[in-house]
Structure formats: structure tokens, C-alpha cells
Amino acid sequence: MEIMHMFATVVEEASLNQAAKKLNISQPALSRKISKFEEQLGVSLFNRKGNRLKLTPIGFITYEYALEMVELDKKFQKAVLDFKNGTKKSITIGASLTTLQSTLPDLIQLITKDSPETDIKAITGKTHEILTLVKKDRVDFGLVASKVEDKDIHCEPLFDDYLKLVIPKEHELSKQKMINTEDLDKLPMILFSKGTLYRILMEELFHHYKVYPEIKMEIDSFEAILRLVSTLRAATLLPHSYLRDSLLEDNDLLVINLNELKQTMRTTSLIYKNWDSLDPTTQNWIQKVKVQYQTYKI
């Protein structure tokens, strides 16, 4: 990294003498370092004519990479300093596909409201993928829709969540005084795509009660499901944590409580590595998230 910084300075000063002064190094020493750098690369970075230095084609390419590396080094040094001082202004969150649509938006809102200058990044994936990201320090912490048992990971349960039946306000079921699981049989429904956590829970429920809905569509997006339910006059099953009053009202939908759906109960959890290995800023955010959900009830 040091030689790339020196090389970039020589290019910008267009003079070994001026660059040496700026770098606080003797001109002969700087000249030797640049020559050795060229020798290591096996190319000439400059065409030398007297005291004039002119970049060769590979010299231009090297200069572009040098600028990137110098800038990256500055960011790295700042990140290390922020870590030491507990003033890190960025956070990377790993979110499973379910929490991406239900819990993550609220969490991001919490962070931006409290610290609007924080740079927030999110990486999504299946639960086992988020677990791997946490272990490899690719994310500061993860959000998953289940409890995790792993000796290398700390799992902090946030809240329990389960599926609820959602129908259009004008749906024929809305006129019934009592609705039970048998009413799902042959019911036109829009469901999650196969292989997702909640789809697996649904299929287990359907199999247990021997009900077989008419599946109109299979979609991964909660938002798309909500919009299409009204359009197709179908029903769906969505996690309670996602069902905001405003979303239901905007789409003319009703939520129906079925006791049997409590069998789909799952715990949304926060996962992270050993507490002492976390930087102070991440520790602070984890504490705030835990406090945020202490009073959360479904």
C-alpha cells in the first residue's frame, strides 16, 4: 500500500523531487523505491526523458488502481479508528427472506431515526446463509425467523410470530360468523413460493387438517401478495408482524384469527457472535433492538 501511495504522489507531482518533499523522503530513496516497484512488476511505469516523467500505458492503469487502493486504505484506517473510538457510522445486517419483509424495515427505521448519518447495508438469504455470514463476520448481526442453536452464535429471541388468514372485505368468508380450518379446503389462495419457511409451515398445517386450498399463485413478496389478494378476490396467509393496519386498510383487507394457525408460531431472533468480539457501536445497536422488542406482543 505504501508504494502505491508513493507512486500516485509521483504521478500527481510530475516530479520525483517534488514528490519526495511531499512524502518527506529523500529523492534518491524515492527513486530507488519506484525502480524496485517497476522491477517487481516487470514493466516500466514511466518514460524517463531527463527530469521529465511521462506515464506509460501500463503506468496509467497502475495509477488508476493506485488511487483506488489509496482511497480504500483511507476508509480502512478510518474504520479501525472508529472501531477503537466506538464511533463506527456503518452497520451491516443479515436478514432472512422472511424478516426482510416484516422485521427489517422497522429495524432500519429505528436506526435511521436515532442515527440518520449511519450507513446501513443489508444482505439477504436463507437462515443458514445468514448464520454463515454472522460466523464469517460478513455482517454485524443477523435477523432470522427462528431460534438458532449453535455453539459459536448467540441467539437473542425478539418476539413470537405466526400466520393469520387475510381476505378481502367483500370476500364470502367475511359474511360467516364462524370460520374454521375446514373453510380453507378448496379455497382460492395466494401462497408463498415452495421451499420458504412459511410455505413449509402452511403445508404441514394443510396436511394435518386434510385441507387442500386451490392455489392460484405462488409469490415470494408479501407486498405483491397483499395487492393481488384484493384483485383476485382470493385469500392468503401472512405473518402477523407484517400486517400493519394501514396496509390492510389501503388494500381493503380483513384479518381472520384461526386458533389452529397458532401452530405456525415461530420466534424471530437476533443472532451475533461472542459479545466481547463486537465493536462498541454494534453492541449499542443490539441493545437498542432488544429494548425495542421487549414490549412487542402479537
Image (cartoon, rainbow, N blue to C red):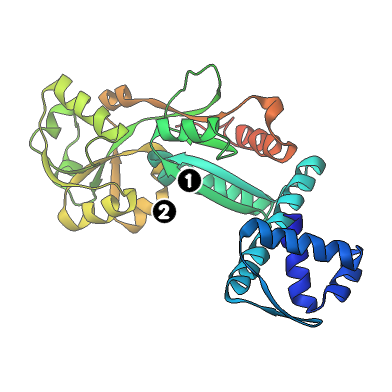
Residue 216 position within the rendered picture, expressed as x and y whole percent measured from the top left: 12, 47
**Dot 2 surroundings within 10 Å: few (below 14), some, or many (20 or more)?**
few
Please give the name of the residue rendered at 80% of the width and 41% of the height, measured from the top-left corner. Answer: 84
Please give the name of the residue rendered at 81% of the width and 66% of the height, measured from the top-left corner. Answer: 31
Badge count: 2
Q: Is 54 left, or right, of 57 in this rendering?
A: right
* Circle 1: residue type: Ile
Q: Is 34 left, or right, of 113 in this rendering?
A: right
Quadrant where the C terminus sits is top left
Location of mark 2 (residue): 246
Location of mark 1 (residue): 123
Q: Nearer the viewer, residue 53 or 221?
A: 53
Q: Nearer the viewer, residue 123 or 287?
A: 123
Residue 210 position within the rendered picture, expressed as x and y whole percent measured from the top left: 11, 23
Distance of mark 2 from mark 1, alpha carbons? 27 Å
Residue 186 position within the rendered picture, expressed as x and y whole percent measured from the top left: 7, 37
Residue 71 seen in this snapshot: no
Q: Which type of secondary structure does the marked residue at label 1 adopt?
A: strand
- Residue 259 quadrant: top left
* Mark 2 or mark 1: whose residue is earlier in sequence: 1
Quadrant where the N terminus sits is bottom right
Please give the name of the residue rendered at 66% of the width and 37% of the height, measured from the top-left corner. Answer: 288
* Circle 2: residue type: Ser
Q: Is 178 placed above or below 233 here? A: above
Q: Which type of secondary structure does the marked residue at label 2 adopt?
A: helix
- Residue 262 quadrant: top left
Residue 198 seen in this snapshot: yes
Q: Is 248 placed above or below 288 here? A: below
